[in-house]
Image (cartoon, grey):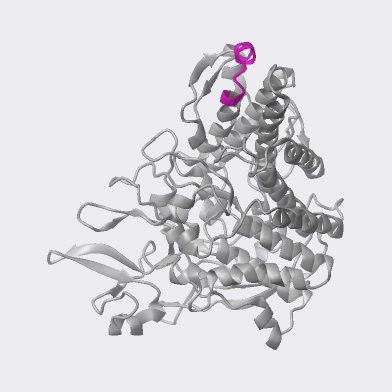
Amino acid sequence: MKPTIFRSILIIACFLFTTSCSDLLDEKTYTFIAGEDLVANKNYDQLVAGAYNTLHYSFEWGNYHNVVNFDCDYQSGPAWAFGSLGAGNFYEDGSNLNFYNNYYKSIHRANYHKYLISKMDIDEKVKANAMGELAFLKAWSYFNLVQFYGDIVLYKTSISEGADIYKPRSPIKEVYEHIIEELKFAETAMYSTKDPEYKIGHVSSGAAKAVLAKVYATIGSASMKSGSVSVMGGPGAIKDDNGTKIYLPVPAKLTFQKSQVAGYEDFDSKEYYKLAMDKAKEVIESGDFYLYPSQEALWSVTNRNKGEFIFSLQTLAGDNSMSNYVASDYTGYYKPDGTLSSGYYVQRDHWYQLFDENDGRAKWGVIHRHPFTISGGKLLYCYYPAKDSVKVRLGQDGYKPTDILRYDAHLYGSKLMKFRDYTTPVDGSRSDFNWPFIRYAEVILVYAEAANEVNNGPSADAIAQVEKLNIRNNSTKVGDIAKTTPWTLESFRSYILEERVKEFAGEGLRRFDLLRWGIYLQTMNAIGVDEKDVIKRREERHLLLPLPANEVNTNPFIEMNNPGW
């Protein structure tokens, strides 16, 4: 498929394995070990760890979060940071190339390592679990690729097993069929989190079920032919007759007619939403996962890999080979003089205005004061948001009257406590934030979304499930909202979409949601240019990311890039 990825593997037929999960820290490291030797030595655990390790590659220099977060309506920052992906300049962007290449590395390792483990003479339950983990990682990789790139090259076996290097792209439907096939295998093969053999930090049968529910819901929304969806958005600022920028902190309600996503025409939306509803309910009823009582408890370092975290990147504090820059990029770190450094990426004010006053995701979840400079030997603090000016003047809620309002691109906006990493070194490098790929909260919202579509309106159980999140977050209960404004199919659909962007801010889901609902272009173009002067205007070509030029130039079966690229 990609000679640039696999040429060295073909030549030397060897692998570098390093462990990525905290439970595997005592495992040996294998360098330049042939596959036959690993089979003979029954090193299934090193093969599994070697596949997990590829997930780190896109995080080492901040690539992954750039791709999944920058191109959406609620995130922004300095124009120099968002001038590429955030402004729609995707072609040959380094983060885009790494995202594509590294997920294919994951697929290759998952395929080949699964093949090697299948030949091992080990306990059948152990073997099944190891192969299930690899099937899950492969399905996860393809799920990400197909959403971003559309038709992609599909490898059901690795080139090390004899698969052709060059293959044509497979249509979206065929890719999803293989994703579902692998996840169905994984959900029956892997351990449950309740099994004594299960290892913290690994995926489980419940993780496969959760992702399967998400896959079904993605297909359900993308294949839906019509329907209205509302979002809160529009421009963040306008200019008066003198050219002075006037900020518009309150977003407007915008209702769009969705379009069916290209490539999903052969799916039945209702059928897949029914599958999503049933599978998500299966996860809920399993008791494998649970919600934490507050946002503060959820994002505590001590609760990593437990409760709500179904599948996360595994990192180690102080290990530069296993860490990433997410925490320092989003919330920054404090230099020895006490001032804030880095922390360039923020949620726009429009996002913050979505919340109830006491919602924990805004009250605790957003950092409201920053020490941004030193003057006269004293630290000066800026505050956020502007509407808290009275609290600042009165010195309430932790503010001080000396706090200053700053509209700098990296200061005015929501810096999220979820990314606060207390182990970040003073230079901000390689923090050990465990990126959450999927959380239990998403399973609840997938269930509610699917039940709404299946039943042409929210069921009592869907409302009850969402209220668990309302209670955890201290937000208005959906049942109480219905007492004054009864829910409809369309209004509850829009509510769930808004809850997703509030709950998973900065976790890489918003762009997926806008695309799968067929409202990406309308939403982005309603902004135009945001208050940070980042261009948000989009064209049809932006519906898919471009394939790397090297992929198009070297694969004889690919005659052109994605439309417009």
Q: Which residue ends up furthest to the left in the rendered image?
A: 376
Answer above or below: position of 70 versus 470.
Answer: above
* Residue nearest the viewer, comparing 539 with 235: 235
Q: Position of residue 151 (x, y in %)?
A: 74, 41
* Residue nearest the viewer, comparing 517 with 364: 364
Q: Main secondary structure of the magenta part?
A: helix
Q: Which residue ends up furthest to the bottom in the rendered image?
A: 484
Is residue 388 rendered to the left or right of residue 338? right
Q: Residue at x 74, y 52 (%)?
A: 213
Quadrant occupied by the C terminus = top right
- Magenta range: 35-46
Asked whether the viewer can see residue 4, the reply is no
Count of marks placed on residues: 0
Q: Residue at x 70, y 16 (%)?
A: 121
Asked whether the viewer can see residue 361, the reply is yes
Whether the magenta-drawn stretch holds residue 37 is answered as: yes
* Residue nearest the viewer, comparing 91 with 104: 104
Tell me where residue 160 sits by quadrant. top right
Is residue 312 rendered to the left or right of residue 240? right
Q: Position of residue 44 (x, y in %)?
A: 62, 23
Q: Residue at x 57, y 40 (%)?
A: 99
Whether the magenta-drawn stretch holds residue 96 is answered as: no
Q: Position of residue 222 (x, y in %)?
A: 76, 57
Q: Position of residue 494 (x, y in %)?
A: 69, 71
